[in-house]
Amino acid sequence: MKIERVPLAEPDLRGQEGKYLAACVETNWVSSAGRYVTEFEQRLAAAVDRRHAVAMVNGTAALQMALTVAGVGPGAYVIVPDFTFAASANAVYHSGAIPFFVDVSAEHWSLDSELVEEVLARGDAPVKAVIAVHALGTPANMDPLRKLCEIYNVVLIEDAAGALGATYRRRPAGALGDAAIFSFNGNKTVTAGGGGMYVTDRDDWADRARALSTQARSGARYQYFAVGHNYRMTNVNAAIGVAQMERLDEMLAAKRRIAAVYDRALGNRGDLSPMPRPIWAESACWLYSVLCASRQDADDLVKLLSEHKIEARLFWESLSAQEPYADAPRRLNGTTHRLSGCVVSLPCSSHLTAEQQERVLAVLSQWRGGIIEDAA
Ligand SMILES: Cc1ncc(COP(=O)(O)O)c(C=O)c1O
């Protein structure tokens, strides 16, 4: 009997995606204008309780726009967690600023606000913004970060790439800073094939983001008010996004159900530690991940699962330790170094079946790793 592969996190396209894509073709609206782009923006803004949402080609572009419209550019530093995807730091460079890597807390794997305060208070780098990354779809501890940003007059931007649907003290991720971005690439709970969204309550920032992402054209003629970008989402991508948004609640519920099953099965093990669930957040459970005791254990676990046709993957590693970011300033506490190469993401597509998850759990029950000394 042929054993089916269990994928890590695949798009769940069981809604109206095909119908809406066909409508794009039938109506000839396949480019960067069209009703699905507007509808996607409206649905997203409503879902995260923001006045404005501006659709972009991807989350990286949206993050760069978030920085640019907030006045962050050459000469500025932006605090970025060391434990994040490269896009969070790359967007800072694309804006002309430089990332200042700050470590995460071992308790929740997001920015350590005490270290952020230390960097802001020391004041030897002109920090203009803080990017709070909601790692794995779980909101960072935003209250202390917001307070610090107010005191030091620094812009607070949420990198909520994988956190659509998450809440922090009952407020939606995306409504917790001055602005936020989301990603809709293929491994996100809500995908658009590719895409990103910039959200904010500020009319001036939203207007500028919309204009700069469409080449900063002044009117109907070929006249420009700035050096712009071609970052607008297409109607084709937005058609998928709208169909996905119609099923957001259903897909989120599935993600949380899958995470709860893993939590129950793995919670008492000493050799695998489920991703942190801080009390302030209801996670979107984007990518269910576990911490292993060592890099070797994590490699062995991925290999064992792969032998059973189950796709698992090592998660983020320290950015500041990598060659492209070698010159960036940093304030670290060893947490990201400890997590690097030891976090394994497990299959968690929203349409993962109970039988598929049983197969994953059966393999995990065969596996034995070293005991984790200081997971939190
Ligand atoms: C934390 C984080 N920020 C930014 C991005 C960039 O999003 P995109 O791939 O849409 O450019 C991602 C993508 O996975 C991400 O995980």
Image (tube, rainbow, N blue to C red):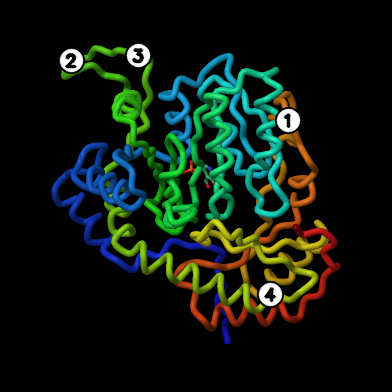
* Mark closer to the chain start, 1 or 4: 4
Asked if 261 appears above or below 168 in the picture, the reply is below
**Residue 275 drawn above or below residue 227:** below
- Residue 266: which numbered mark, if any? 4
Q: Position of residue 261 (x, y in %)?
A: 57, 77
How busy is the neighbourhood of tag 1: few (under 14 within 10 Å), some, or many (20 plus)? some
Q: Which is nearer the eye, 169 or 7?
A: 169
Q: Where does the image place residue 303, in percent across and percent down from the top left?
A: 74, 66
Mark 2 burial class by Cα count in 10 Å: few <14, some 14-19, many 20+: few
| Mark before the other along the chain sequence, 1 or 2 | 2
Q: Can you tell me whether the CB of the residue at mark 4 lies under 8 Å from the nearest atom of ligand 1? A: no
Q: Which mark is residue 221?
A: 2
Residue 11 in picture, x, y percent from top left: 43, 61
Element type at mark 4: helix
Q: Amino acid at mark 4?
A: Leu
- The answer to which of marks 3 and 4 sits earlier in the sequence is 3
Task: Give the residue at x 58% y 33%.
Answer: 148
Amino acid bearing label 2: Arg
Report how far apart the C-alphas of labels 1 and 3 lie in the structure: 33 Å
The image quadrant of residue 356 is bottom right
How far is disc 3 from disc 4 in space, using C-alphas? 53 Å
Per the image, the residue denoted by label 3 is: 226
- Where does label 1 land, which residue? 330
Give, as a three-letter code, the residue at label 3: Ala
Spatial distance from mark 1 to mark 2, Cα to Cα? 46 Å
Instruction: Name which of mark 1 and mark 3 comes first in the sequence.
Output: 3
Q: Quadrant of the C terminus?
A: bottom right
Who's the residue at 50% across and 34% down the image? 156
| Label 4 Cα crowd, 10 Å radius (few <14 / some 14-19 / many 20+) | some
**Mark 2 vs mark 3: which is more N-terminal?**
2
Q: Name the element at disc 1.
A: strand
